[in-house]
Image (cartoon, helix red, strand yellow):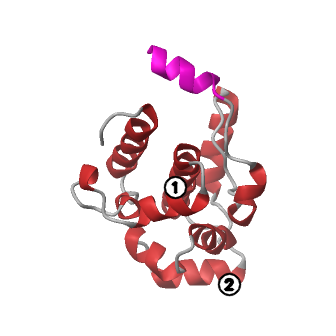
């Protein structure tokens, strides 16, 4: 673990739980291995379909845009939202990535509006791509996370 990582892990979180009340995720990131294993089980069982609308509302974007960016079937999401069913494992994983990156962006930018704006606008460090549009793949998720970590560390992005 580098000195920067140690300092970052010792910093108190600046994200207040009330700030995420609208997008209360079914799974949250914690470092305990047992909790993370339970999170995997939750994702496999599926996040409630209603979390899709909560997450898009917290991001301040229409559900349709999130559906397009994450390359999921609109009819499946709408059906799961309306029926109260759980999302399938693949869609749960994509939504989980969005929730985690949004939380990280709020920690980095320290305010919701700046985090939302950064996530929704093309970023030069990401090859001109919109960060949210990259979250449909694991590699894209890692690239967006890395970009946020560089910003947090004060490294020119």
Residue 53 lies in the magenta-colored region: no
Displayed quadrant of residue 85? bottom right
Residue 100 is situated, as x and y percent measured from the top left of the image, at: 55, 49
Left or right relative to 6: residue 140: left
Examine the rendered structure and indicate whether residue 22 appears above or below residue 138. Answer: below
Which label is found at residue 93?
A: 1
In this rendering, would 33 be left or right of 150? right
Q: In 3D space, how far apart are the residues under numbered discs 1 and 2 (Cα atoms)?
A: 20 Å
Q: Residue furthest left?
A: 127
Task: Pinpoint residue 53: horizontal percent, then vertical percent.
Answer: 63, 75
Residue 143: image quadrant is top left
Which label is found at residue 82?
2
Q: Earlier in the sequence, mark 1 or mark 2?
A: 2
Residue 5 sits inside the magenta stretch: yes
> Magenta stretch mostly in which secondary structure?
helix
Q: Is residue 61 or residue 85 the one in the foreground? A: 61
Magenta stretch bounds: 2-11
**Element marked by disc 2:** helix
Instruction: Tell me: 95 left or right of 121.
Output: right
Q: Secondary structure at mark 1?
A: helix
Name the residue: 60% across, 59% down: 112
């Amino acid at each position: 673990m580098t000195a920067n990582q140690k300092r970052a892990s010792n910093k108190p979180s600046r994200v207040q739980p009330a700030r995420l009340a609208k997008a209360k995720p079914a799974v949250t990131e914690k470092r305990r291995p047992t909790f993370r294993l339970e999170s995997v089980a939750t994702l496999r069982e599926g996040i409630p379909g209603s979390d899709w609308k909560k997450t898009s509302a917290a991001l301040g974007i229409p559900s349709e845009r999130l559906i397009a960016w994450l390359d999921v079937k609109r009819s499946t999401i709408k059906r799961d939202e309306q029926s109260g069913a759980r999302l399938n494992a693949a869609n749960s994983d994509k939504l989980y990535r969005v929730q985690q990156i949004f939380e990280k962006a709020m920690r980095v930018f320290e305010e919701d509006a700046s985090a939302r704006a950064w996530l929704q606008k093309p970023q030069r460090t990401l090859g001109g791509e919109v960060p949210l549009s990259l979250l449909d793949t694991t590699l894209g998720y890692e690239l967006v996370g890395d970009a946020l970590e560089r910003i947090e560390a004060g490294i020119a992005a």
